[in-house]
Image (tube, helix red, strand yellow):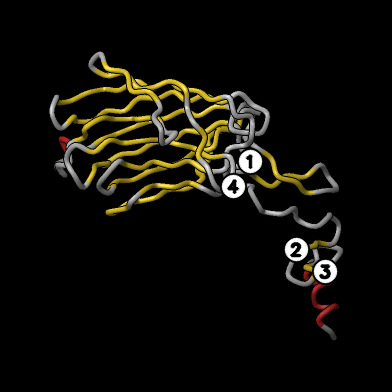
């Protein structure tokens, strides 16, 4: 005799057999409003029986923050999604420079204006490259600009303590072809004293532009 009677007869009465949407569905009868989705990448929705919340995989997890594919880019910048994590993994592949002899540099910043200096450096073939006047650490020196797969650079960086008040450090490995010396593996170890939260990561070159795929992951430890 009515839509309500039909639902009751079918066993799908709103508010009794099924949850009722409220407006855009952000609030549901019988449970609290769904929590905000901001900065919750990679998490799952759970409930304690009365309130909904976001949860993380037990024992820690690695979550994708952003993937960038560079084509003749002046630099690579990761500026969003960092606030939810203290530790990160940054990887790159199919990576090469537009010009022979270019250096690859890594920096981070904790404010809108200035990149913070790093202490430490890269070691390859007996040479150690420390942070320079531009407050960056050199990942690779005199790279080949050849686009062949055999000459492309690959890197993996582990970044620790990015949140406010934490001691910060970075380790990693870069495999690349030096324009003059052939194939090299650079083992990176660096750190810095600034306790402000990191707000961005930057990969750039002293000259020439960048090609390749760059992926940033956030590491949850709980």
Do residues under tags 4 and 1 come within 8 Å of each other at their CB atoms?
yes
Comparing 136 with 163, the one in front is 136
Determine the CA span between mark 4 and mark 2: 18 Å
Numbered disc in front, either 3 or 2: 2
Q: Earlier in the sequence, mark 3 or mark 4?
A: 3
Q: Residues within 10 Å of mark 4 (few under 14, many from 20)?
A: some
Q: How many marks?
A: 4
Residue linked to disc 2:
26
- Residue 84: give its label: 1
Residue at point 58%, 38% (across, down): 198
Query: Image quadrant of residue 71?
Result: bottom left
Comparing 171 with 13, the one in front is 171
Where disc 1 sits, the SS reads loop
Instruction: From the viewer's perspective, tell me whether residue 14 is left or right of residue 105.
Output: right
Residue at point 78%, 49% (across, down): 52
- Residue 38: give its label: none
Numbered disc in front, either 3 or 4: 4
Residue linked to disc 3:
14
Q: Position of residue 29 (x, y in %)?
A: 84, 62
Q: Residues within 10 Å of mark 3 (few under 14, many from 20)?
A: some
Numbered disc in front, either 4 or 2: 4
Q: Position of residue 84 (x, y in %)?
A: 63, 41
Residue linked to disc 4:
41
Residue at point 18%, 29% (across, down): 178
Determine the CA span between mark 3 and mark 2: 16 Å
Determine the CA span between mark 1 and mark 3: 37 Å
Where disc 4 sits, the SS reads loop
């Amino acid at each position: 005799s009515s839509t309500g009677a039909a639902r009751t007869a079918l066993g799908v009465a709103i508010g009794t057999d099924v949850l009722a949407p409220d407006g855009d569905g952000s609030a549901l009868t019988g449970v609290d409003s769904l929590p905000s989705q901001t900065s919750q990448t990679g998490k799952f929705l759970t409930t304690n029986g009365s309130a909904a919340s976001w949860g993380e995989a037990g024992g820690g997890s690695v979550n994708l923050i952003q993937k960038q594919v560079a084509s003749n880019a002046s630099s690579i910048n990761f500026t969003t999604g960092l606030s939810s994590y203290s530790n990160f993994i940054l990887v790159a592949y199919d990576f090469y420079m537009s010009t022979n002899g270019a250096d690859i540099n890594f920096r981070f910043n904790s404010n809108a204006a200035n990149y913070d200096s790093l202490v430490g450096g890269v070691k390859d073939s007996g040479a150690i490259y420390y942070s320079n006047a531009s407050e960056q650490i050199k990942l690779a020196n005199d790279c080949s600009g050849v686009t062949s797969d055999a000459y492309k650079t690959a890197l993996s960086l582990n970044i620790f303590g990015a949140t406010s008040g934490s001691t910060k450090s970075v380790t990693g490995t870069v495999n690349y072809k030096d324009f003059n010396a052939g194939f090299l593996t650079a083992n990176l170890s660096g750190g810095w004293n600034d306790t402000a939260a990191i707000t961005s990561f930057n990969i750039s070159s002293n000259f020439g532009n960048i090609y390749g795929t760059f992926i940033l992951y956030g590491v949850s430890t709980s």
